Amino acid sequence: MNILLTNDDGIFAPGIAAAYKELVKLGDVTVVAPSDAMSGAGHSITVFEPLECEEVEVPGAFTGYSVSGSPADCVKLAIMEICDKKIDLVVSGINNGANVGINVYYSGTVGAAMEAAFYKIPAVALSACRKGDVDLTSAAKHAGSVLKKLLPPKHSGVVNINIPQLTPGNPKGVKVVPQSTFGFNEHYVKEKSHTGKTQYQLTGGNYLDKDSPADTIALSEGFVTVTALGFDMTDYKNMENLHQIKWD
Amino acid sequence: MNILLTNDDGIFAPGIAAAYKELVKLGDVTVVAPSDAMSGAGHSITVFEPLECEEVEVPGAFTGYSVSGSPADCVKLAIMEICDKKIDLVVSGINNGANVGINVYYSGTVGAAMEAAFYKIPAVALSACRKGDVDLTSAAKHAGSVLKKLLPPKHSGVVNINIPQLTPGNPKGVKVVPQSTFGFNEHYVKEKSHTGKTQYQLTGGNYLDKDSPADTIALSEGFVTVTALGFDMTDYKNMENLHQIKWD
């Protein structure tokens, strides 16, 4: 099995090294990841500038390809230019921070996996809850054992896997749950820069939903969450309303 | 009606000025847009750095707020910090380039509108086909007349409106069509930088689908396309497969 591994925390992040150690047990792994941390990159791509790509050694972990772009750029470039063999599975992560709820839109980790899905390659996004200390090695082990259940990879779209905070007793098990569409409790802190300009720093980020059968809730309860994500954003219910309008 | 206007081509782009001229006929318009062009920004947000915001005058057009971030950042900041009054409608665009098919994932224009939808504010993304010369003033007029049909704004999610190439006879009418999930025909051009590094420039971008009842096709045929987009990415069909797996 040929596995392409990427992430959004950058090629030198501990999470991708931890994921690599699990994935080499399952197949041949090629790493193509951003040269810099790209958290919040979402599904952005680089259109006006060329991407630079170079082979880099991450000591004690792997030799991979570093790309001057977003996580989705890495997947696009890997599929079209870097990988010689057919890719059977794309893994993105393991991210230092959960990617559940509407956060999946902002997530470079999920964006990279979705890019693979565009090319009809089965893709998995791996993320670990960041509350408290994060043991990404243990989180990657849990993610790896969940991932094994999806092999041989044949799903379409993205399977989004999140590992809960690894306190004693966690994970409590695995739950297949839909993506929450509730928002966050977040705000900006207003301050003055040293040049006198007004600056706003985003902060907060607790989820607003409390009791729905959603990824946000199950993760906070200590379960590993598994969610199938697709890329048809069409809202068919609202489409019915649009069809009622006399346009001409 | 209080309208928030943003875009992804930046506050000084001709498209946002053209959109502004149409929107002031409909209500009070506050402009909060990126200081720089952010094409391909998708739904990225700025998490690790503060945003800078300043009032700027765009000569002959409007006075608005310029933000050192992504289109989604602009909407978030406008809702939480800049706009005093309740926002009734968020408009993003008009973008110089179509946003149909899987391109909506890469689109900062749609990302900004989706951010508003997270806050339960009706949102509209406006884009114009870039093939040949683009007359954004005419495109904005067509978009404005379509937008009027959605007033007073009460839809959830995003209504994604695309204006076709304005050749004689176009637009042929308005079509309510789903988002195409087919990919593009695109590739990288490989070259060496002046420092000897390998660089890859993304190019191409024709859609691969030929005959489905999709936004991509209708737009290329000369119709204005109208598509309802939502933000529950859960793929319920694939969820059924995941529920069949024995996880523990």
Image (spheres, coloured by chain):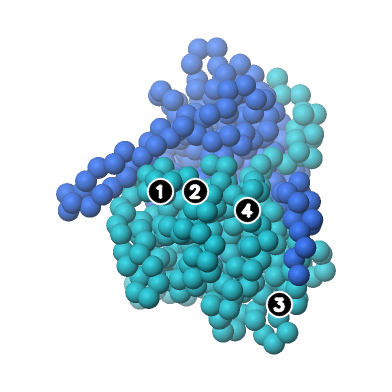
Chain colours: A cyan, B blue
Gap in angstroms between the C-alphas marked 3 and 1: 35 Å
Residue of label 3: A171
Chain letter for mark 4, please. Answer: A
| Amino acid on which disc 1 is placed | Cys
- Tell whether label 4 touches label 3 (CB within 8 Å): no
Name the element at disc 1: loop
- Pointer 1 chain: A
N-term mark: 3 or 4: 4
Closest to the observer, A67 or B231: A67
Distance between the alpha carbons at the discs numbered 3 and 4? 24 Å
Residues at discs 1 and 4 in contact (Cβ within 8 Å) = no
Q: Determine which of the numbered discs, if any, sits on residue A152 in the image.
A: 4
Q: Which amino acid type is shown beneath numbered disc 4?
A: Pro
Secondary element at image label 3: loop
Q: Residue at x 50, y 20 (%)?
A: B166
Residue type of the residue flagged with mark 3: Pro
Residue A87: image tag: 2
Alpha carbon separation for disc pair 2 and 4: 12 Å
Give the residue pinned by disc 1.
Answer: A83
| Residue B170 on image: x %, y % | 55, 16
Q: Is circle 2 on the same chain as circle 4?
A: yes
Q: Quadrant of the C terminus of chain A?
A: top right
- Gap between marks 1 and 4 measured at Cα: 20 Å
Is the residue under label 1 in contact with that under label 2 (CB below 8 Å)? yes
